[in-house]
Image: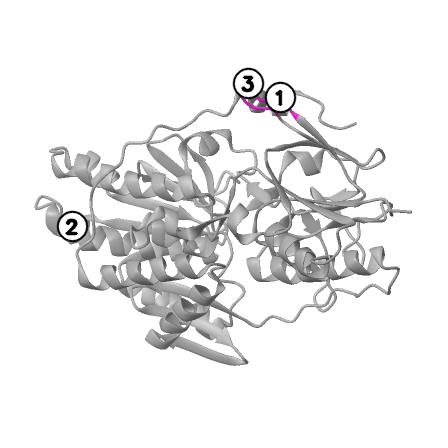
Amino acid sequence: MARNKKKVVVLGGGFAGVECTRKLEEYFKNDSDIEIVLVSEDNFLLFTPMLPQVASGTIETRHIVMPIRTITKKATFYEGRVKNIDPYGKIVNLWGSGNKRGISLHYDFLVVALGSETNFFGMNDLEKNAYQMKTLNDAVMVRNRMIDMLEQAENETNPILKQSLLNFVVVGGGFAGIETAGEIMDLLLDVRKYYPNIKKENIRVVVLEALPNILPGFSESLAKFAQEKLTEHGIEIKLQTAVTSFDGDEVMIKRLDVDKDATGDSVISSIQTKTVIWTAGVTPVNTIKRSLFKTDKGKIIVDKNLEVNDFPGVFAIGDCALFMDPSSQRPFPPTAQIAEAQAKIAAKNLHALIRNEEKTEFTYESKGQMAIIGKRTGIASFLGMNIHGIFAWFLWRNIYLSKIPTWDKRFRVFLDWTADAIFDRDISRLKFMRREPEKEYKVLDEVDDVW
């Protein structure tokens, strides 16, 4: 008598979801009784560590995306956005789009790896007017914005307005913010020679960070080195400074390290700018926040095996999962390195669950951290050593190049880096429109997507 086929559904096409799917394919490669399904809003895996280099034009857009169908072998792929999850009925519903109707997927086992989205902390004007650095479209829009501001400033005769066009503010002093600031400064300085009416001293890039230091994951010495190098490169860094609003012309900022004024109010100042890039936080997607899973601050609470509380056979990994670091008693940060480590354990435990074997507790030990802080300069904490300068930059490039899943994209990125070292930067501005969400997606905040 034939055994019933079991369906494993993985939600999310980021680092966690794709890595988990590939590991499941390895575990069940010769098992025809297991069906693996991967669902992702995009049909590609985006290599997010290189997004700032797309924004600066160092790397071409398509070279950091890998089609999911080419990097998964056994899994059935669905391109779609998750509408809701019914953990009691074991059903996942996907939104429809255009003339395409929604799809319902039944599952026996589920891995939730839906990632996160940008958190604007309720500041609607900032969400409307600021740029982000989370998707491929974000990186392209930022690059276009840089070129657009240069084009406008070149022929602007009003000195105050001209300076506001050339003021660029990056909010967030973590990996994304610092690497973005370094890349856009490199871009602006490299292409300035094409704009004779713009002086070097007119170009201003400012990083705003609410904490007392940038790059909090690094040692104090490396963070200090990074700050000094960025300052030498002309980037202003304002620590313990929070953004309160941005109307498209002026960003309001509040100092967190000074006493209040005589009236008892916080000291508020402003920067005249047309461009704010927000990298200061992420939050789980609404589908997770409204789900029937137990959550804390929007993240799904999981046990030591990454299994969701009260729902055996359901695992949560990556940015949408809440797993406490035993050493610090704080949640693990939302990094690709941790997401992939969790993906491996989730796949292993799912295999053990199906085979009635003992599951493995998730433990994590960082292999190191790296960041690029400008042209041919970086910092790295690797194998217990603190490294900075050109060697850290070279190490970053080699390690991240090796992590790109396909050889053809590795080769293309390598060629991009080679071309960037030889030729001048391209200042073509491709005029894309901001695409409105599909009709079904627009009402996402107005509907109850919980069973």
Does the segment drawn in magenta span residue 101?
yes
**Is residue 289 left or right of 334 when viewed as pictured?**
right
Give the position of the C terminus as an image quadrant. Answer: top right
Q: Secondary structure at mark 2?
A: helix
**Is residue 34 left or right of 419 when viewed as pictured?**
right
* Residue 99 numbered mark, or none: 3
Where, by quadrant of the figure, is residue 303 drawn?
Answer: bottom right
Does the segment drawn in magenta span residue 356?
no
Foreground label between 2 and 1:
1
Question: In the rendered view, would you say 220 is above or below 139?
Answer: below
Along the line of sight, the residue nearer the viewer: 295 or 79: 79
Give the alpha-carbon distance from disc 2 to disc 1, as whole Å: 49 Å
Where, by quadrant of the figure, is residue 248 drawn?
Answer: top left
Amino acid found under the numbered disc labelled 3: Asn
Q: Residue 310 in the image: state x and y as whole percent.
A: 87, 45
Q: Residue 190 in the image: state x and y as whole percent.
A: 19, 55
- Is residue 324 visible in the rendered structure shown here? no
Q: Which residue is mark 2?
A: 192
Range of residues picked out in magenta:
96-102
Q: Earlier in the sequence, mark 2 or mark 1?
A: 1
Question: In the rendered view, would you say 357 is above or below 294?
Answer: below
Q: Which residue is mark 1?
A: 101
Assess disc 3: are there few (<14), some (14-19) or many (≥20) residues with their C-alpha within 10 Å of its C-alpha: few
Question: In the rendered view, would you say 215 is above or below 167?
Answer: below
Amino acid found under the numbered disc labelled 1: Arg
Question: In the rendered view, would you say 122 is above or below 323?
Answer: above
Residue at image point 11% right, 34% down? 155
Where, by quadrant of the figure, is residue 230 drawn?
Answer: bottom left
Give the alpha-carbon distance from disc 2 to disc 3, as whole Å: 47 Å
* Residue 381 numbered mark, or none: none
- Is residue 276 visible in the rendered structure shown here? yes
Q: Earlier in the sequence, mark 2 or mark 3?
A: 3
